Amino acid sequence: MGLARFGLRNLARHPGRLAVVVVLIAVPFLFLLLTRAIGAAVLEHTEALKRSVDTALQLRARGSMGHVNMVGSSDLLSQGVLDKVRQLDHIVKVEPYLLAMTPTEGHNFAMVVGVNPGDAKRLESHGEAGNPRIVAGRDLASADQGKDVGLIGQGFARWAGITTENLDRATLTLDLRRTHPAIFALDRPARMLRIVGIHASGYVFGDMQLFIPLETFREVYGVPGGISWLFLRVDSVDHVADVRRRLDGLVGDVADVIAPEHAALFASTTTGAVLRLARWGTALAAGLMAIVVFFVMLLVVRERAWEIGTLKALGAPPIGIVLGYLIEAVAVCLIGALVGALLFALAGSALAPRLFALGAGPFLAAHYRDTLFDALPLAGVGPTSLPGLLGLSVLVAVAGSAWGLVQVVRLSPLEAMRHE
Amino acid sequence: MSDRQGLIVLRDVVKEYRKGRETIRALAEITLDVPEKGMTAVVGPSGSGKSSLLHVIGAMDRPTAGEVIVAGQALVALAERDLTRFRRQTVGFVFQTFNLMPTLSALENVMLPMEFNGVPGEARRPRARQLLERVGLGARLGHRPRELSGGEQQRVAIARALANDPPLVLADEPTGNLDSTTGQVIYELLREIARERTVLVVTHAEALAQMADRVLPIKDGRLETQGVVPRSL
């Protein structure tokens, strides 16, 4: 019959009171689990967003679309920008492009894009989308660099009379002297390209693009240096804002920087806000549990002062008495936590969205709120580390009972004499 | 101790309490020598200092001044840890209100001081059983205090006081919560155990005082006898 067992046996002295105390601890523990689960779900959702979000930044010459023959918009980024951006941290890929326009029929035109083979074949006006499907022939290869070859969009191919059947002998001649209201002539000789493949994007304008090797473009259009577009891929959405800031400082006087900051903004604002709320919720719940334990232990020590005095008068070691009461506090807290966990298992899925709507919803930006509400997998949330949280409840029990235990230590054996 | 003295030796013991700005002198230069074995009754009106005397002898309270030597141990010089050990090994307490642990059975209550004293589990149970049988409660071992009468509870408390076989048993008004018939049983039990050890009883009860080997009347914190009780009366 150790004092530890003595402490445990004390739990059963007042079953009604024990039930009330367990509920008082279970409710904040349930709240703690819910806030943790909401935080975990939001974090998981954000990580999923980060994985699917394009982290590429686009640079263009300031105020220019950067097409080498586009009326009023033919300024290019200097070649030096390429060297500067390569020095930045968190850049995992640098993709330079050159662009030109070529008239087709009426007021329509097609786009010629110089790209390093292997880089993303980006579709203008759909810059985020890239690498359209190859429906015939092959893609550009590194061996094609500098050669007169091209990968043509299915719309442009249809205009040029190129089909899957005649692809093996298909050519396209670029006549740089032809003009258009938005295209000025270049005094360069026409160039015949061999078409090696046909791509299809599903976008009308994307299907009017012709990809040729970057060095080939430079020779065809006489552009020895300069870049129309420069795409920089950042290693993580978390670094996009930082890279953007540093790019502004580095080339901001000559370049427009277009950054997909929505995901980064989402991570830093919405997710951050929810996680902060979840952390505060956890702290609040732990605090409430500690307060319950604090008052319960004070009550217990006060009403059992004579017992503590008696134990001391009988020569019980103070550490043993403290241990008995500490075990009682920890046991109460653990029972409360387990009941809270049980309630979470039974009703967490139903309660979490309501708590999220009530607690976090008002603090979120309106344009994120509905998206998050719809996307959060709250039905499937669960405590990621119940043992850890139970460990937390033990710590809470120790913290909450600390003052009561100090009183236990201070009590004199004379308290035994004050028992009525 | 160079010369052989009594089990309890007090020299000029003073105990003062502060109550607001007032200082209350509960014990005034008490000098006392209680021999080994036998029952000594401390009698006196309420507030006379008899309980304070018991607390000081039982190491539950420290004197303001003076010397307290019990079973050869100078209590004033002992650290808290040693006082705890002293209470565990040298003294057995019997309280007016029995003070049994309500969640423990009679047997477990008697085993408790032995556990504090490091007595192995296999030795505790038979000794506790033997002590309870000695006080006539062999059939009530598994009963909790609330299932026992007042007299039975006090007998369990006496068995508990004897658990570690202490040379001194201190009893504070042991019959104060009992009717006279039951009180008589307790008197006789205390007298019986006083044959083998010292029993110091604080009491209002005239009957119990008359059964004691020695009586120490106390009033206003002072002993009314010459102060030192002879070793044999």
Image (tube, grey):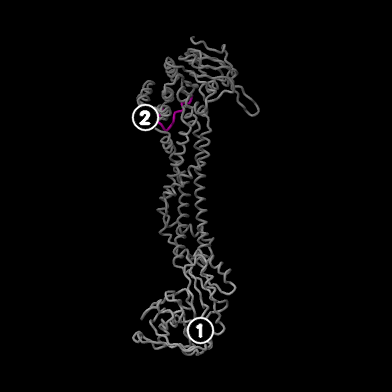
Q: Which residues are magenta?
A: B96-109
Q: Is A101 located above or below residue B120 in the figure? A: below
| Of A331 and B1, the residue lying toward us | B1
Q: Is B152 located above or below residue B5 in the figure? A: below
Q: Tell me the CA gap for discs 2 and 1.
A: 100 Å
In magenta segment, residue B98: yes
Q: Main secondary structure of the magenta part?
A: loop
Q: Residue furthest left?
A: A165
Q: Residue furthest right?
A: B21
Q: Residues within 10 Å of mark 2 (few under 14, many from 20)?
A: few
Badge 2: chain ID: B
Q: Residues within 10 Å of mark 1 (few under 14, many from 20)?
A: few
Badge 1: chain ID: A
Q: Is A389 located above or below residue B36 in the figure? A: below
From where the camera sits, is residue A398 visible?
yes
Residue at disc 1, secondary structure: loop
Percent coordinates x, y for residue B132 in the rendering = 38, 23
The kind of residue on which mark 2 rests is Gly
| Of A39 and A246, the residue lying toward us | A246
Q: Residue furthest top?
A: B233
The kind of residue on which mark 1 rests is Gly
Residue at (51% x, 80% y) in the render: A224
Give the mark toward the camera: 2 or 1: 1
- What residue is pinned by disc 2? B121
Percent coordinates x, y for residue B201 in the rendering = 49, 18
- What residue is pinned by disc 1? A222
| Of B173 and A261, the residue lying toward us | A261
From where the camera sits, is residue A420 visible?
no
In magenta segment, residue A146: no
Percent coordinates x, y for residue A67 in the rendering = 52, 81
